[in-house]
Amino acid sequence: MLPKFYQNCFQNVLTPAQYKMLEILLMLLQFHQTVTIEKLATVFPQPIRFESRRRSIQRFLLLPQLSIPYLWFPLIKRWVKNSFRTREKRLIFAIDRTQWRSENVFVISLIEQKRAIPVYWLLLPKRGCSNLAEQKKLIRPLLQLFKGYPMLVLGDREFHRIKLANWLHSKGIDFALRQKQGTYIQQENQSHQRLQSLVLTPGISFFLTGIQATKQKGFGKFNLAGYYKRQYRGLVEPAGWFLLTNLDNFADAIKAFKLRSGIEAMFKDCKTGGYNLESTHANGQRLIALILLIAIAYTSAVLLGRNSRSSGLQKYVGRLQELKRSHRRHSCSDLQY
């Protein structure tokens, strides 16, 4: 069952029949953990021919109401209003990209209590990395949606370019963007040097202020945080972090960037770890709509799981040991299943 404010948001924009269809699809999605249209049509509880059920689902996914701005933005805005009681608290977003079959999906997610909540996503018409225009296109809708909230954007090495950092800063957005080792920096009164020359090794950290992060002229000066987690029990990370940021201190930059891993966990939940999105052959608008269904199912599961935990019900929930899994699940988002 969907949380109450989800129901209110959806019933305002969908007809009763459309809302019932959405509710049934979300129930099937949670129970069967798949977004393959053929599988959903197979288990859809309607006494009509299979082909008719399949076409009915396909038509539903093409509804103009089933769009991110129309259906999802009002709900995610309500989510933020409920979760962040004051506008003084900074909203932290992570941007990343993942390849699902031939589809290149570009996503920005809200990091909230170590969970990544998908906010907006685009299908890129190519393989490989995004460019600055596509990055701006992904982030711009959030400027209006969360107007008045302080914002921080986290990005891995794909988003290392100074042009993105400069644009975010011009919009009043804080950022922490991981840099490639080949990036040139210039400290005051010194010549340019590559980051790899700073020799970041396990256990080492530093914070440089007022550095120029490119040989190109015309860009502002920012700060650079270097961090390499120390060796622990014989294990060492493959590489340290060089973070270009406009945050004022080392601790804030590192603490924030550690939250970026939430978006990788979200991708896993959407793929083989949960809803098996990679199994679908849908593309274009149908794929965007299926991702929207996953976002609704995923976030409602997180909310219901948290409510179960806060009401003391979590200790009554049993999860069977899964094959080839060494530890039982303890995530709040599985409690709905």
Image: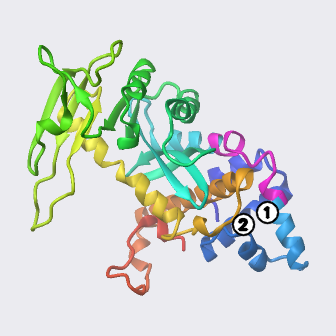
- Quarter of the figure with residue 134: top right
Above/below status of 302 relative to 146: below
Question: Which residue bears the numbered disc 2?
Answer: 25
Residue drawn at (27%, 18%) of the image = 221
Dot 1 crowding, Cα within 10 Å, few <14, some 14–19, many 20+: some
Within the magenta stretch, is there residue 21?
Answer: no
Q: Which of 169 and 283 is in front in this view?
A: 283
Residue 147 left/right relative to 324: right
Residue 3, can we see it? no
Residue 157 x/y as whole percent: 35, 42
- Main secondary structure along the magenta-highlighted residues: helix
Quadrant in the rendering for residue 310: bottom left
Task: Say left or right for 61 vs 255.
Answer: right
Count up the numbered dots: 2
Q: Do the residues labelled 2 and 1 touch (CB within 8 Å)?
A: yes
| x and y percentages locating residue 327 in the rendered image | 33, 79
Q: Where is residue 149 in the image (x, y as percent from the top left)?
A: 46, 29
Dot 2 amino acid type: Leu
Name the residue: 10% across, 51% down: 202
Image location of residue 294, percent across then percent down: 61, 59
Q: Which amino acid type corresponds to the residue marked 1 in the rendered image?
A: Met
> In terms of secondary structure, where does tag 2 sit?
helix
Task: Please state the extent of the stretch shown in magenta in the rendering.
Answer: 59-73
- Label 1 residue SS: helix
**Mark 1 — residue?**
21
Q: Quadrant of the N terminus?
A: bottom right
Q: Which residue is drawn at 57% across and 51% down?
A: 104
